[in-house]
């Protein structure tokens, strides 16, 4: 299980799942200062930590189970470019 993944990899998998715009809306709905932190990280080259506050919060907002998030991280790690 990857402990963290670059956010671009997460974006690819979320787009394939049809959830990318939902995640972006969830980030926009976060309270400050979390919204600004997540927005800047999401738009930059940050890495997402599997057990990080942002990942756990967005997973809950999207209704994703722990297993689904694990599978997202595994799929993201396996991407070849």
Image (cartoon, grey):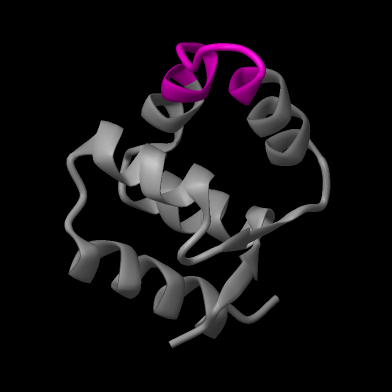
Residue found at x 32% / y 63%? 69
Give the magenta part as a residue range: 25-35
Q: Residue at x 51, y 43 (%)?
A: 54
Position of residue 49 in the picture relative to residue 56 (left or right)? right
- Percent x, y for residue 48? 61, 58
Q: Nearer the viewer, residue 33 or 75?
A: 33
* Quadrant of the snapshot with the C terminus: bottom right
Expressed as whole percent of the image width and height from the top left, the position of residue 76 reads: 51, 71
Task: Tell me which corner region of the image, top left, top right, bottom left or bottom right, holds residue 60.
Answer: top left
Question: Quick check: 49 above or below 46?
Answer: below
Q: How many marks?
A: 0
Name the residue: 46% across, 64% down. 51
Provide residue 11's location: percent of width, then percent of height.
55, 49
User: In front here: 9 or 31?
Assistant: 31
Let me know if residue 29 is in the magenta part: yes
User: Hey, which residue is sitting farthest right in the picture?
Assistant: 44
Let me know if residue 53 is in the magenta part: no
On screen, 16 above or below 9? above
**Where residue 75 sits in the image (x, y, percent)?**
42, 75
Residue occupying image coordinates x 55% and y 79% = 3
Judge whether 60 appears above or below 32 on screen: below
Which image quadrant: the N terminus?
bottom left
Q: Is residue 39 left or right of residue 54?
A: right
């Amino acid at each position: 299980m990857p402990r963290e993944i670059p956010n671009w990899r997460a974006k690819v998998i979320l787009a394939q799942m049809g959830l990318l715009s939902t995640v972006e809306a969830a980030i926009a709905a976060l309270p400050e200062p979390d919204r600004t932190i997540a927005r800047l990280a999401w738009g930059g080259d940050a890495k997402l930590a599997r057990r990080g506050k942002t990942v756990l919060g967005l997973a809950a907002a999207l209704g994703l189970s722990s297993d689904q998030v694990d599978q997202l991280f595994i799929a993201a790690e396996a991407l070849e470019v």
